[in-house]
Amino acid sequence: MRTISIIIPCYNEAENIKLFYEAVREIKLDAIIEFWYIDDGSEDGTLYEIIKLSQEHPEVHYLSFSRNFGKEAALIAGLEYATGDYIAPMDVDLQDPPSLLPIMLDKLDKNSELDCILTKRNSREGEPAIRSFFSKLFYQIESKLSDVSMESGVRDYRLMTRRMVDAILELREYNRFSKGLWSWVGFKSETIGYDNIDRAAGKTSWNFRSLFRYALEGIINFSNVPLEIATLSGIVICLLSGIAMLYIIIRALIWGDSTSGWPSLATIILFMGGLQLFCLGIIGKYIGKIFLETKERPHYIVAKSSEDKVNK
């Protein structure tokens, strides 16, 4: 019988470990399910709960990182270790409804041309308005700047075929933005919607700052447009500066030199300095990513695993 591997990144989610397992087990699926809990360096009792669950249920596997490497590292680790014919990344807080799994599997069964079933929230009810606004803005900017299409509200939660996952695993870059990579590899997909669901328990580890950095990574990883904007800004400012210089020379020749205008001059200098620093910051961000890629460091380090002989 075919197998579905569920990848569950976890960071300080001790309250949700067993709740998630029980919720998935209540769903009737015409497939064997294997669970891959990825403990991303949690500081609470998450790992204890996962180990306890794996000892009680042989279909539960886990990886525990040596420190917090981030959700992207947890996702790539899960994809690498999963052995299923189908793979589904899911959030452990049950905001990704397990009840959609049979529907997703049925769609893949009925259409052999499909390799992925995406899930999308129909609305963002219950989410802070400011977070919802900036999230929608990010997806609009990302879609316009990059060569991949990412729709607002689409989740990491999806059911993918093995051949699609194998294609994703061929992308070995260190700087990862999974939503973009999953879109970049192509393959035909279909989207199903659902209403927003609150967390089962606990508090999210995501805040506005971390989400902003995550969005910035997504834009830079999949677009050179910021560099082009910096270049275009430099060209425009140079042209305007040249016109201003001609004006100053002509004015001096006709009306004579004047010491007036120092406030405007200081303003222009400060503006130019800020623009230069802004452009250097953009260039520096790209150079920093190149620097990280050349190091060829691993995406994660496993400190403990259900696959280790000492844990069996």
Image: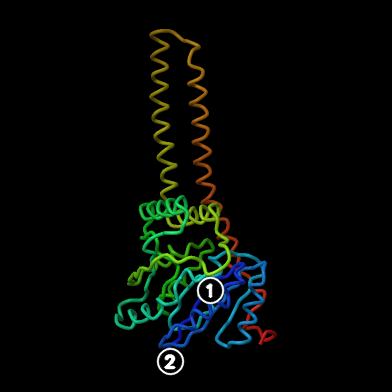
Whole-percent x, y for residue 10 in the image: 58, 70
50 is higher (above) or lower (below) than 300: below
- Label drawn at residue 8: 1
In this rendering, position of residue 55 left or right of residue 36: right
Q: Number of marks in the image?
A: 2
33 is higher (above) or lower (below) than 246: below
119 is higher (above) or lower (below) than 134: below
Whole-percent x, y for residue 117 in the image: 37, 73
* Residue depicted at 47% across the width and 54% down the height: 128
Whole-percent x, y for residue 228 in the image: 41, 45
* Residue depicted at 52% across the width and 42% down the height: 280
User: Tag 2, which secondary structure?
Assistant: loop
Whole-percent x, y for residue 260 in the image: 49, 12
Tell which residue pokes out farthest to the bottom in this image.
1
* Mark 1 nearby-residue class (10 Å; few <14, some 14–19, many ≥20): many
> Hey, what amino acid is under mark 1?
Ile
* Mark 2 nearby-residue class (10 Å; few <14, some 14–19, many ≥20): few
- Label drawn at residue 1: 2
User: Tag 1, which secondary structure?
Assistant: strand
**Distance between mark 1 and mark 2 Cα atoms:** 22 Å
Coloured how? rainbow
Query: 20 or 114: nearer the eye?
Result: 20
Q: In which quarter of the image is the C terminus?
A: bottom right
Query: 299 or 58: nearer the eye?
Result: 58
